[in-house]
Amino acid sequence: MLKKLVFLGTGGTIAGTATDTADNVGYTAAQVGVERLLGAITGLRHAVGDCALESEQVVQIDSKDMGWRHWCALVQRVQHHLAQSDVAAVVVTHGTDTLEETAFFLSRVLDGQLLREKAVVLTCAMRPASSSTPDGPQNILDAVAVARSESALGVLAVCAGTIHSARDVQKVHPYRLNAFDSGEAGPLGFVEEGRVRWVHPCPVVGAPVSSTSVQSISSVVWPRVEIVMNYVGATGATVRALCRVPTADEPAVRGFVVAGTGNGTVHEDLLLALREAQAQGVSVVRATRCAQGCVVPSSAIGELLDSRGLSPVKARIELALELMEKAADAALAKTTSLF
């Protein structure tokens, strides 16, 4: 059976344009559709080999504006294509600003069995499509090489010839082409002249929620989880303000992730406010603002759960998913008790 590589477009810099081909920062993101983007890449037909190519525009936005409804649309389309027996892998073109969050989200909610059999590869660009020297075309070719590799599984990110896992990938530079890093974990592999050199096996996470919830995820209420940071002179004012009774058109805060200094340390006034929030039923998770390493559990503020090595933005996603799961379990228990 002829296998397909499915490309899902979401916009981003890779699809951006500027009036001047020398302008790599003053562009407008998400201007070129994925079909046109792919059609302009010399050598793509050769790169996909004996696979058929299919493309679909899921959303068309600057990734800084990525939101829950966009994720809902994307995860459903990715899940749909992964479930097709004639689809070998899915490649997602995405903006760099929130790629690490989308990759982690997909790795946590997509059907774990499908992720153990196929790969979802996110790729991007730091220069717009209109640039005289765009990096997007090569990144897409590298993503294709990874997607076609028999060793590729789960959700991966490919940029500047480097393969990252969804859990560890992080944007670490605002301008250079190799803007992503995997910290202490290191990259999973590299793409060199169209060939993939793996240095670590692909980790496969599996969904914390059932595959049926992916199909109905658009109807799920995304719990409001905010991120606060510790710094010199930090106070609990922001936390207390966010915990006030919400207006009719905004949801109540359900959780906080605090990006602590060092080993997750938190200013005494901010810590007091977080403890007050906990007493009101708000969940609190402690991460570190450090770019590498993770919070080592300590009895000093042990009542705050640590992020289990996740960055603040990924810890926010994880906490939101846990809160969604608890809400679903509570609703099921309530329904069951009626019978």
Image (cartoon, grey):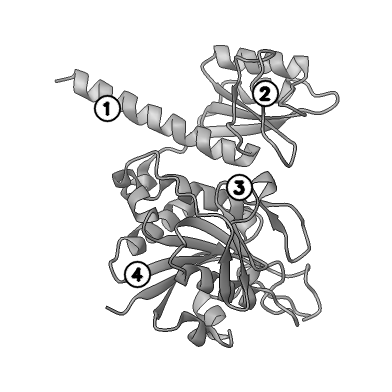
**Callout 1: SS:** helix
Q: Position of residue 54 (x, y in %)?
A: 40, 77
Decide: is 115 above or below 45.
above
Front-lying residue, 134 or 168: 168
Disc assigned to residue 239: 2
Q: Is residue 3 left or right of residue 256?
A: left
Q: Amino acid at mark 4?
A: Val
Estimate how packed mark 1 is, as few (under 14), some (14 to 19) or many (20 or more) residues with alpha carbons within 10 Å: few
Q: Amino acid at mark 1?
A: Leu
**Callout 4: SS:** strand
Q: Position of residue 92 (x, y in %)?
A: 50, 65
Residue indicated by mark 4 = 87
Of marks 2 and 4, which one's residue comes earlier in the chain?
4
Q: Residue furthest right?
A: 232
Of marks 3 and 2, which one's residue comes earlier in the chain?
3
Query: Cα distance, mark 3 to mark 2?
Result: 28 Å
Query: Cα distance, mark 2 to mark 4?
Result: 46 Å
Give the label, 3 or 1, closer to the camera. 3
**Callout 3: SS:** loop
Disc assigned to residue 332: 1
Query: Cα distance, mark 1 to mark 4?
Result: 35 Å
Mark 4–mark 3 CB contact (< 8 Å)? no
